[in-house]
Image (tube, rainbow, N blue to C red):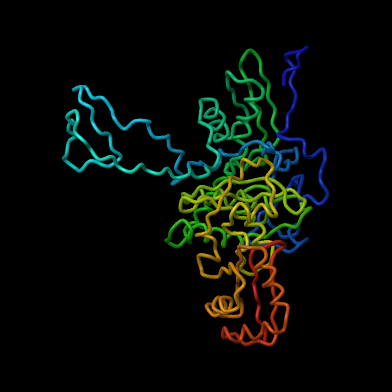
Amino acid sequence: MVNEKNPNTWQDWETDDWDKSQPAGFESWDESPWQSPFEKPFASGEWENSGWDAVDPLRQPAADDWNQSGWGKPSWEQSGWDQPGWDPPQPSPAPSNWQQQDSGWPTWQSDWDQPAGREERSTPAGTEHPRPQPVREQPPRRQAPAEPPMDDNMRALCAAVEGMQTTARVTGVDEKQLQALVHRVMIKPEYFWLDSRYSYRIQNGVAEVFFKLKYSNAPYLRRQLEQVTSQILAGMPRGDEYQRALYLHDWLCANVTYLKRGERTGQDIYEALCLRCCVCAGFSKAYAYLMQKVGIQCAVVEGDARGERHAWNRVVIGGNLYYTDVTWDRETSNRRCYEWFNLTSAQMLESHRPENPAEMPASTATADNYYRRNGLLLSTWDERQLVRILAKQKGDILMVGFDRRQVYNKARQAMSQSDFFRLLEQAGHRCSHMRTNTTEGGWGITICLQE
C-alpha cells in the first residue's frame, strides 16, 4: 500500500491478521523453519533424529498457509468450478406462441422437436392448429459459485508463480483488486512453494507484487511431488467418479499421518503427499489437488469446527454437490471410516461453519454417500432393517450409517444395551464383546466384534 505522503514507500501485507489473535487450541499457526522428509509416518518425537536429509527453506520461517487463504474471500479458482449437469434457470416462456414470418403468414412455434428432414410450413390464415400443453419449468438447481474469468493480470501472476519468480507486474488495478488477484493465486493447492506473506506497491498505474517462497529448493520438491502423484494415481482402479474419489479418500486416510493440534507443520500438499504428515489444511488441499488431477471438481472450504480453525472439501460427483472431511475420517483411528464422505450441506453444517457461506451452497444429493451407495444406511429406526444391514457384512468390523440425528441417537442407545447381541446373532455375527466407534457428531457407527 502506497503511503499518501511518500508514494515511493510501501509496506508488507499479509493475507489476514489471524496471527494477531490466535484462538486457543488452534493447530499449527507457524511453520517449522526445517522440514524432514520421510517415507513412513513417524511416532511423536522420533522425526528429529530420523537420519533423513533436511530441506532448507528461506531464512525467514514459513508462515502458516492458512493466512494465504485471505480468509473470508471466495475460493473458486482452484476448483475449476464449472458444475457439469447443473442447469441454469430457464427464461420464462414468451407470452405468445405465434410468430410473424417473412411470408406474412403466422406460424405455430412449438416446443416439439421437428422430425429429421421435415421443414416448417406456413399455416394459412384461419386454419386451426391444436395448442400443445404448456411445458412446466423445473426449479433451477442451486449452483456452486462461479469461477472468476481468467484475465491478463491473472495470467501474468500465474506465469510468474509457475516460473518460481518472486516478482510480477500487473496494470490497471487498484489495491483491493490486486489483493483479490493475489488471493486467487495463493489458494491454488499446486502452488505449495508460496509463502502466505507477500509485498506489493502500486505506482503510476503499475502494481508490483513481491512473492516469498517457503522452500529454497522448490523446483526439486515440485519434481518429487509430481513423481509421488504419479505413483498414487497409478494404483487407482478403473471406475466412475465415485470410485475415484473413494480411492483418493482411502489413500490419504491410510498413508498420511494426522498431526495433533499444536504441531508446527503440515499445511501444504508437499508435506501431505511427500512427507506423509499434515493437519487439516494439508489433507483438504491434497484431496483437492489429487481430485483435480483425475478430472473431478473439488475445492477447499475454510471455516471452523469444534471451536477451532478447520478445512474440508466440496466435491461434484455425478453432477451433484457433496461435502467431505478427509481429516476427520483419518483422525478417528486407523480403521476404515466414511462418516464424513459425501455428505449433504445440512449434515455438514451441524458441525462445520464456513467463514464465507457462499463457499457452501445448499446440497441435498445422497446417491453417492458411502453408506447409501453400499446399502448400509439406516434412515428410520427399524430393527429388521438394521439386522439386514449387519447381515450384509462379513468379518469383525461392521458399519452402519445414518442420515437423521434421531435415528443415530436411537442406534447408539440400542448398541449400549446387552440385548443388542440378539440382533447381532440374528445377523449371523456371534461375539461375546463388542466396541463401538464414531467421531464427535459423526454420521456413522463402526462396530468392532470381539470374542
Quadrant of residue 412 in the image? Answer: bottom right
Q: In the picture, which quadrant includes the N terminus?
A: top right
Where is residue 32? Give x, y as percent.
75, 47
Question: Where 340 sits versus 2, above or below?
Answer: below
Does the rendering let one see residue 254? no
Q: Quadrant of residue 410?
A: bottom right
Q: Residue at x 71, y 59 (%)?
A: 51
Q: From the viewer's perspective, tell me whether residue 55 is left or right of residue 366.
A: right
How far across and how far down the image is residue 25, in percent? 81, 52
Image position, residue 303 (x, y; %): 69, 46
x and y percentages locating residue 432 in the rendered image = 69, 87
In this rendering, would 198 be left or right of 111?
right
Q: Quadrant of residue 111?
A: top left
- Residue 427 seen in this snapshot: yes
Q: Image quadrant for the C terminus?
A: bottom right
Count of marks placed on residues: 0
In this orientation, which residue lies closer to the viewer: 91 or 251?
91
The residue closer to the viewer here, 421 or 446, is 421
> Which residue is more in the foreground, 378 or 22?
378
Q: Is residue 110 above or below residue 255?
A: above
Q: Residue at x 69, y 38 (%)?
A: 71
